[in-house]
Image: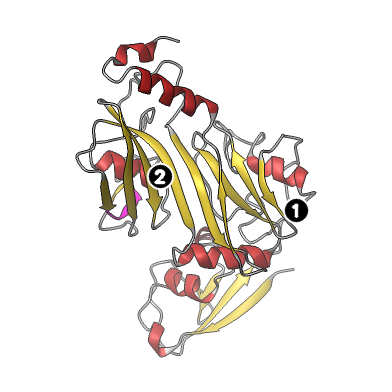
Amino acid sequence: MEESIGLTVSPEMEGLRIDKFLSEMLKDYSRSYLQKLLRDEKVMVNQKPVKASFRVSSGEEISVILPEMEELSVEPENIPLSILYEDDDLLVIDKPKGMVVHPSAGHESGTLVNAVLYHCQGNLSGINGILRPGIVHRIDMDTTGALVICKNDYAHQKLAEQLEVHSITRKYRAIVHGNLPEDDGTIQGAIGRHPTDRKKMALNEKNGKPAVTHYHVLERFGAYTYVECQLETGRTHQIRVHMASIRHPILGDQVYGPQKCPVKNLQGQTLHAMVLGFIHPVSGEYMEFTAPLPEYFEKLLCRFRGNHSDTSVLNND
C-alpha cells in the first residue's frame, strides 16, 4: 500500500528547488530515490505533479507519495567477504578489486549486495531501495578497500547524516602519473556529469557539486608518485577526476588517464580506500578501520622501489 507524507514549506526555505527541499526535509531517503519520485510524478504541489526544477513557496503544502516497497529481486549469493568489523548494526568490509557494489545492467549477480544479503540473511537497511540494501556509500568496481554496510534504517540514517556534513574519515592510497611538484596540496572543483560523455564525471562548476580532495606525497618514483588522498567531500569518481584535473591521473585509470597503461595486466585504477572512520550510530564512539593494501598494489610498489629510474620493468611479469 502506498504511503503519503505531507510537508509544509517554511519561510526560510522559500525559493528552494523542490529536489533540494525534499533532501532537506526527508533525510531518511537518498537523493537518487527522491529524484526518482519526482520523475515518477509522486511529488505533488496543489495536487499537481512537479519537476525537480520547481521552486517552492512559503506556506505551500507538498504531498510525497511513497510507493509500496517492491519485493527484493536480488538473490543472496555465498560469496566470501573480508570482514574488518561487524556488530548488530553495521558491517565494515574490505572490498576486493573487480567487485561491483550493487546490481546494475550487466552486473546482475556477483555484487557486494548479493554477498551481504547472504551473509546478513536479509537484515539490511532499506533506505536506498531494493537494489542497494544497506549501502550508504560506494566505491568503484576496480577500487579496493573499506566500505560500511548498514543492517538497519536507524544506523543508515545516522551514517548518512555524517556523510552529509563530511565528518566521516576517508583516506585513500593511490599511485599517480608524474612527479607532483609539492608534498601536500588541496584540489577544489565542483564535480558533475561530463557534458558529452554521460558515463564520465568532470569538473563542472555550473552543474556540479562542490568537491574537495587533500593529498599528501608518500613516495616518489620519478615518473610516478605514491600518494594519500583524503576526501573532504564524496562525489562520484572524485579522486580520479581531481587528480586527472591537475594532470596527474591515477595509474591504470583508462577513463580519466592514458588509454594505454604502462603496467601489463593491470586492471583498473590503483586506488585503495585504506582508512574509514565514523561515529558509531548506536554507541556514539568514534571508530576507525584500516584495510591493508591489496597484494597487487604492494607488489607494484616493490617493483617501483627497486627500479626508481627504469620504468621498462613495468611491462615484464
User: Is residue 67 visible from the viewing direction of this image?
Assistant: no
- For this rendering, which residue is in front, 127 or 285? 285
Q: Residue at x 47, y 38 (%)?
A: 272
Task: Pick out the residue farthest to the front.
Answer: 306
Secondary structure beneath label 2: loop
Q: Residue at x 58, y 74 (%)?
A: 64
Residue 189 on the magenta segment: yes
Amino acid beneath label 2: His
Q: Which residues are magenta?
A: 188-193
Q: Residues within 10 Å of mark 2 (few under 14, many from 20)?
A: some
Q: Is residue 109 left or right of residue 298?
A: right
Main SS category, magenta section:
strand
Quadrant location, the C terminus: top left
User: Is residue 118 visible from the viewing direction of this image?
Assistant: yes
Task: Pick out the residue farthest to the right.
Answer: 121
Secondary structure beneath label 1: loop
Q: Residue at x 70, y 69 (%)?
A: 2
Q: Residues within 10 Å of mark 1 (few under 14, many from 20)?
A: few
Between discs 2 and 1, the one toward the N terminus? 1
Which of the 4 image quarters holds residue 29? Answer: bottom right
Q: Which mark is residue 237?
A: 2
Residue 138 location, x and y as percent? 53, 48
| Contact flag, marks 2 and 1 (Cβ < 8 Å) | no
Amino acid beneath label 1: Glu
Q: Is residue 63 left or right of residue 265?
A: right
Residue 302 on the magenta segment: no
Quadrant location, the N terminus: bottom right
Residue 79 location, x and y as percent? 72, 34
- For this rendering, which residue is in front, 82 or 196? 82
Residue 101 location, x and y as percent? 58, 42
3D distance between C-alphas at marks 2 and 1: 31 Å
Q: Which residue is mark 1?
A: 71
